[in-house]
Amino acid sequence: MKIGELARLLGVSTDTLRYYEQHNLLSPSARSESGYRLYDQTQLKQMQFILRAKEVGFSLKETSELLQIKVDKNQHSCEEVKGITLQKLELVRARIAELQCFEKSLSKLAKRCCGGQESADFCSILTALEDVDGTHK
Amino acid sequence: MKIGELARLLGVSTDTLRYYEQHNLLSPSARSESGYRLYDQTQLKQMQFILRAKEVGFSLKETSELLQIKVDKNQHSCEEVKGITLQKLELVRARIAELQCFEKSLSKLAKRCCGGQESADFCSILTALEDVDGTHK
DNA sequence: ATAAACCTTAGAGTTAACACCAAGGTCAAG
DNA sequence: CTTGACCTTGGTGTTAACTCTAAGGTTTAT
């Protein structure tokens, strides 16, 4: 299978596949005489793994770690894999908390603003941002 | 006030202040003979506005928009300001939803994995990512 | 008068995950 | 035998918000 076919099968671009190769996520199984990358079912599976890891929120770097483990599973422990997962989970939760803080502040700001067509001279959003204690009132 | 003093007052780096200047968020009120940036209370206030906007989740670009409006408020409406705020709010909520999806998948994966020191040969996390329908089981 | 602390500019580096481009080689069909 | 679709490499561009560096000028304290 050439790169374009694999890309079409997976719904990604050929650039993406080459990018993943550069970053040690997926190598073609062979090259044709003329230098074309050739892939087979193994690579297809591996790409599906990568895309699924992505869906779950893993970065390419983390996915790469998981792949390293996967290639010789018996040299690695469940502990390691779960460690990576929990670490990511922590990070995701922290980010969610941060964004929820933003959400709270923003909705508070929006709720108090009339949003009308009159001039912004007394806009409650602007004054809240101006006042030192604006975010806590 | 020279740049270093203002930076110390605000707890930011001088680089940051210069960066904000480049991006039209804050200009010094004057320059000394030798070319040093000079700031006064107005700039201090403005930086506090910027930092508060940041705390609330606004990007520098959005903050810049808010500042544009603030400088001549009576040429702008509450509608505009609230528009920017609501748009940001939407974005934040969308991002939260996405991350919550990750969170759900990751915690499901983590929960099912023993996390022990035994080899990862049968690690449920790896197999879930291998199986096509792994994320939905 | 000299060292330390401060300031200047311009420009490069960082992170993530690609997208896009140029210049050219390859392959199948008509 | 020539289009057109495909492939190659190597390189640049994108976004955000800075951070760091180099090479040099200024100020202040001793």
Image (cartoon, coloured by chain):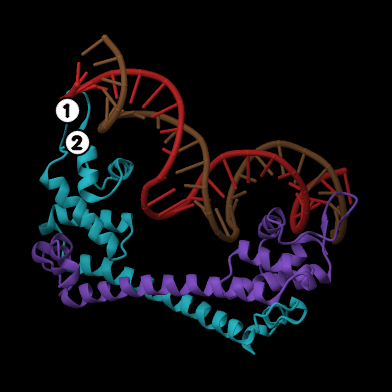
Chain colours: A cyan, B purple, C red, D brown
Q: Residue at x 18, y 71 (%)?
A: B136
Dot label at residue B24? none
The quarter holding residue B137 reads bottom left
In-front residue for pair A116/B2: A116
Q: Residue at x 20, y 47 (%)?
A: A9
In-front residue for pair B24/B66: B66
Q: Position of residue C6 (x, y in %)?
A: 77, 57
Q: Position of residue B27 (x, y in %)?
A: 78, 59
Q: Secondary structure under badge 2? A: loop
User: Is residue B14 shown left or right of residue B42?
Assistant: left
Marks 2 and 1, how far apart at CA:
9 Å
Q: Position of residue A128 (x, y in %)?
A: 68, 82
**Is D10 situated above or below D28?**
above
Q: Are marks 2 and 1 in contact (CB under 8 Å)?
A: yes
Residue type at tag 2: Lys
Q: Chain of mark 1?
A: A
Looking at this rendering, what residue extends furthest in the right direction? B33
The quarter holding residue A65 reads bottom left
Residue type at tag 1: Ser
Q: Residue at x 15, y 65 (%)?
A: B133
Which of the marked residues, 2 or 1, is nearer the chain's N terminus? 2
Q: Does residue A68 show up?
A: no
Q: Position of residue A54 (x, y in %)?
A: 29, 60
Q: Residues within 10 Å of mark 1 (few under 14, many from 20)?
A: few
Residues behind callouts 2 and 1 on a single chain: yes
Q: Does residue A46 show up?
A: yes
Per the image, the residue denoted by label 2 is A2
Q: Residues within 10 Å of mark 2 (few under 14, many from 20)?
A: some
Per the image, the residue denoted by label 1 is A32
